[in-house]
Amino acid sequence: MSAEPGKRRPPVRAVTGPVLGRALRILEAFGPRHAALTLTDIARRSGLPLSTVHRLAGELIAWGALERDTAGRYTVGLRLWEVAALAPRGQGLRERALPYLEDLSQVTHENVQLAVREGAELVFVERIAGSRAVPVHTRVGGRFALSATGVGLVLLAYAPPELQQEVLGAAIRRFTPHTVTDPQLLARMLADVRANGFAVSDRQVTQDALSVAAPIRDPAGTVIAAVSLVVRYGSFAPQALSPLVRSSARAISRALASA
Amino acid sequence: MSAEPGKRRPPVRAVTGPVLGRALRILEAFGPRHAALTLTDIARRSGLPLSTVHRLAGELIAWGALERDTAGRYTVGLRLWEVAALAPRGQGLRERALPYLEDLSQVTHENVQLAVREGAELVFVERIAGSRAVPVHTRVGGRFALSATGVGLVLLAYAPPELQQEVLGAAIRRFTPHTVTDPQLLARMLADVRANGFAVSDRQVTQDALSVAAPIRDPAGTVIAAVSLVVRYGSFAPQALSPLVRSSARAISRALASA
């Protein structure tokens, strides 16, 4: 389920100035399966000349945005992680939500996930693997399609109408025979999510898993994140899980409001 | 215990090119108590002209390194957090260590901390607050002095000799009457840490807390992180906690080696 940022992410969205744009392309060269790179790797993955990569990587190292590992390869640096820990939709949300996610984990021993929407995809902000749960392969910081998972269906259901139309109008990726790829059926499912306040993804991502997700709202009522339980198909009825997930989502929304 | 990156961090360490250096100064303007800033705030905190801030913030927004909140203020963006989630010493370490940290938390209900060294300070990579534990005020991504906490004493004890001399040669900050500020006594404590394989910070940070910490090693045996339990002073003898913390540290080291 983990995505490869270097591949799936759109390229730099706006025309940035040449120097800053190139530095950001160096950061984009790193990915889950490319966490440690040589200068040559970075040049190839970013499309930048080796001399440019050498100079800018040196500046990024000096600041701490990159580091070198014991083998001399470049990695993302701790200082960038320190700054990024200030992202309200990343670490900020995660810190507020974590006690409730741990409660969900401890009372169910199932997989718990927390995600936010970034454009037409979702980003997992936290996951707690259940000790006796169905295996899931999400990664914190990893991306995934909105159209298949429980958290994705929630985030899509409450996304701006034009983004929903964009997702429904494009080819919808099939993961299993149960993945809903018919735009009209998916549109009805999204209306149900809004009516019921929760989403069910029934074997739409993997054949053995079912997830139930609910929306997390900011104080103004806007849906800003989604929380889900992912269980083995057949172990629980969705109706048994939805009150639990919904009450957790409401507790997290309340914790955000009191921040 | 949380630090203010904009204040405590050293300024940009090397002469970076003007554009990239300015963009990094914009990122440095954000801090735990300055997570949402106007352009004017950023200009004031970074020392950059408003026109420069306006232009570079626009580029950082376009890429996703910054975002705007509902009030129009600038915050650190989710995309920067996604890239930073690839930092081996940040999220990478945290993901590997988390199951063991949760075990420590669940068997003790005390505070658990995970930290790495960054220069002459430590950075907290994870913390789990104990449900019935003494309050601690660490923040994930926050910095702290090496010389007082349990995790700091471990990281300092195994730091390069020249860095130890730098810390012992400078004024050592006092937090409580129990803080060890005598360089010779601190040097002996560090030798004890290396001999015993764990560190005890006895009311050296706050008057009511004691912490016991142990080193986490990479496959080559180099100490790369430290884990600790922080308990109320008088509730546990350090000798009762050290085998537990040491065995957790060894389990995390083993998990890193099998990565």
Image (cartoon, coloured by chain):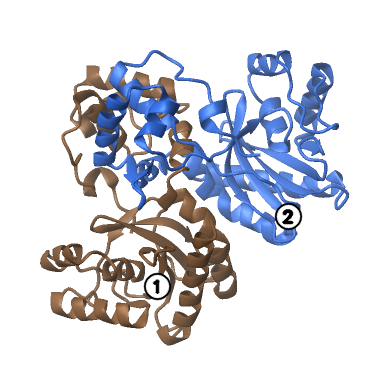
Chain colours: A blue, B brown
Q: Amino acid at mark 1?
A: Ala
Which element carries disc 1, helix, strand or loop? strand
Locate residue B29 relative to residue A104 in the image: left or right.
left
Residue B69 appears in the picture as rendered = yes
Location of residue A183 with respect to B133 vertically, above or below: above
Name which residue lies at 23% across and 30% down: B21
Q: Residues within 10 Å of mark 1 (few under 14, many from 20)?
A: many
- Give the x, y percent position of residue A71: 36, 50
- Give the x, y percent position of residue A228: 70, 44
The number of callouts visible is: 2
- Residue at numbered disc 1: B213
Circle 2 chain: A
Locate residue A62 relative to residue B101 in the image: left or right.
left
Q: Residues within 10 Å of mark 2 (few under 14, many from 20)?
A: many
Q: Amino acid at mark 2?
A: Glu
- Residue at numbered disc 2: A110
